[in-house]
Image (cartoon, rainbow, N blue to C red):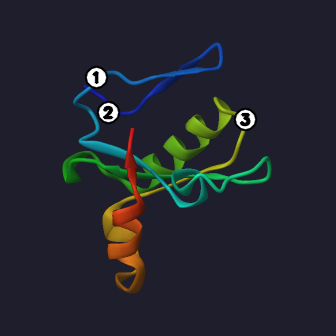
Amino acid sequence: MSCWPTTENGYVTWPSPTALCVCSCLGSAARGEDDAKSDLDLLVEIPPERLHLFDLLELGHEVSDAPGVEVDIGTPDMLKPAIRDQVLAEAHPL
């Protein structure tokens, strides 16, 4: 089973509630400081056997289409060590 969402009629549908272990909102949206120009930063924890860079990029494009804002998607391993603890502390699971 695929862990990637589908987009239909502007809505994103995940194939299974267990497909992603965790999806969290980060950055200005998580802090309540976002505005009309802000992007949406998401942190996803995906089982390693399902994680492929091109799939992650495709997921970002798919999800960006639904809310009409740019969405940046990353994994915890992609966070720079210097900011990792602070970013994870501010993350809001969705």
Is 83 displayed left or right of 36 in the figure? left
| Residue 57: x %, y % from top left | 52, 51
* Callout 2 crowding tier (Cα within 10 Å): few <14, some 14–19, many ≥20: some
Q: CA distance from mark 2 to mark 1?
A: 7 Å
Residue labelled with disc 1: 16
Q: Secondary structure at mark 3?
A: loop
- The residue sitting at 50% across, 42% down in the picture is 59
> Where 88 sits versus 55, above or below?
below
Q: Assess disc 3: are there few (<14), some (14-19) or many (≥20) residues with their C-alpha within 10 Å of its C-alpha.
A: few
Number of other residues with Cα within 10 Å of mark 1, as a class: few under 14, some 14 to 19, many 20 or more: few
Q: Earlier in the sequence, mark 2 or mark 1?
A: 2
**Residue drawn at the location 41% of the way across and 61% of the way down:** 90
State which quarter of the image contains the N terminus.
top left
Count numbered badges in the picture: 3
Point out residue 30 in the picture as x, y percentages from the top left corner: 51, 52
Q: Earlier in the sequence, mark 3 or mark 2?
A: 2
Q: CA distance from mark 3 to mark 2?
A: 22 Å
Which label sits on residue 51? Answer: none
Task: Give the Cα distance between marks 1 and 3.
Answer: 23 Å
Residue 73 in percent (x, y) is at: 49, 53
Q: In the image, is residue 90 above or below residue 16?
A: below
Q: Nearer the viewer, mark 2 or mark 1?
A: 1
Query: Residue 3: which disc?
Result: 2
For label 2, the SS is: loop
Q: Which residue is mark 3?
A: 68
Name the residue furthest front: 32
Secondary structure at numbered mark 1: loop
What is the three-letter code of the residue carrying label 3? Answer: Gly
